């Protein structure tokens, strides 16, 4: 009886581990569009040059009329409305819906 219980626990634990491993490997193969060293999911929008680009099919960028998902600055992604300040004396930058930064005067 004890051996059956131990065997059942080991079997259950191995199923649990294999399910977890499968979930992790599925996540590892999710298609992503790359922009610099950042990956984006299909449907994500980012400003690149003069236009906003959308990640289609998880591998390709195409120009779109949609708003950007956020703004890129110094290798980091900021959401719409975020404010970035270089210093207390410099104007702040605010992320706009078109993916561009706008300088805001000091208050």
Image (cartoon, grey):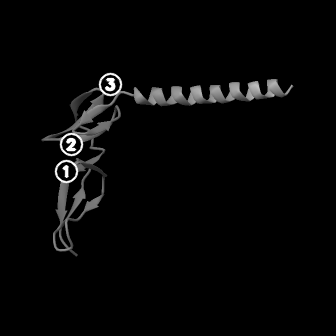
Residue at 41% across / 29% down in the picture? Answer: 28
Q: Residue at x 75, y 24 (%)?
A: 7
Binning the other alpha carbons within 10 Å of mark 1 as few (below 14), some (14 to 19) or many (20 upward) gives many
Image coordinates of residue 41 in percent, x first then y, are 35, 34
Task: Look at the image and tell me in which quarter the N terminus lies.
Answer: top right
Q: Which residue is mark 2?
A: 47
Q: Residue at x 23, y 37 (%)?
A: 35
Mark 3 lies on residue: 57
Residue 73 vs 104, above or below: the answer is: above
SS class, disc 1: loop
Q: Which labelled disc corresponds to residue 63?
A: none
Q: Nearer the viewer, residue 98 or 24?
A: 24
For the residues labelled 3 and 2, the Cα–Cα distance comes to 18 Å
| Quadrant in which residue 86 is drawn | bottom left
Local crowd at mark 2 within 10 Å, few (<14), some, or many (≥20)? many
Which structural element holds mark 2? Answer: strand
Proximity of marks 1 and 2: CB atoms separated by less than 8 Å: yes
Q: Earlier in the sequence, mark 1 or mark 2?
A: 2
- Label 3–label 2 contact, CB within 8 A: no
**Which comes before the other along the chain, label 1 or label 3?**
3
- Which residue lies at the image location 30% right of the left edge and 52% below the top edge? 80
What is the CA distance from the residue labelled 1 to the residue labelled 2? 7 Å
Image x and y of residue 47, in percent? 21, 42
Residue linked to disc 1: 100
Please rate how many residues cluster around mark 3, counting C-alpha atoms within 10 Å: few if below 14, some from 14 to 19, many from 20: few
Q: Position of residue 88 (x, y in %)?
A: 21, 73
């Amino acid at each position: 009886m004890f051996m059956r219980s131990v065997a059942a626990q080991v079997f259950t634990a191995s199923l649990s581990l294999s399910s977890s491993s499968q979930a992790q490997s599925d996540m590892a193969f999710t298609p992503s569009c790359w922009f610099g060293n950042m990956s984006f999911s299909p449907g994500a929008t980012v400003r690149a040059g003069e236009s906003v680009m959308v990640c289609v099919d998880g591998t390709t960028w195409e120009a779109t009329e949609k708003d950007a998902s956020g703004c890129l600055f110094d290798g980091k992604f900021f959401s719409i409305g975020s404010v970035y300040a270089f210093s207390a004396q410099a104007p702040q930058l605010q992320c706009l819906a078109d993916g561009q930064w706008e300088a805001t005067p000091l208050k």
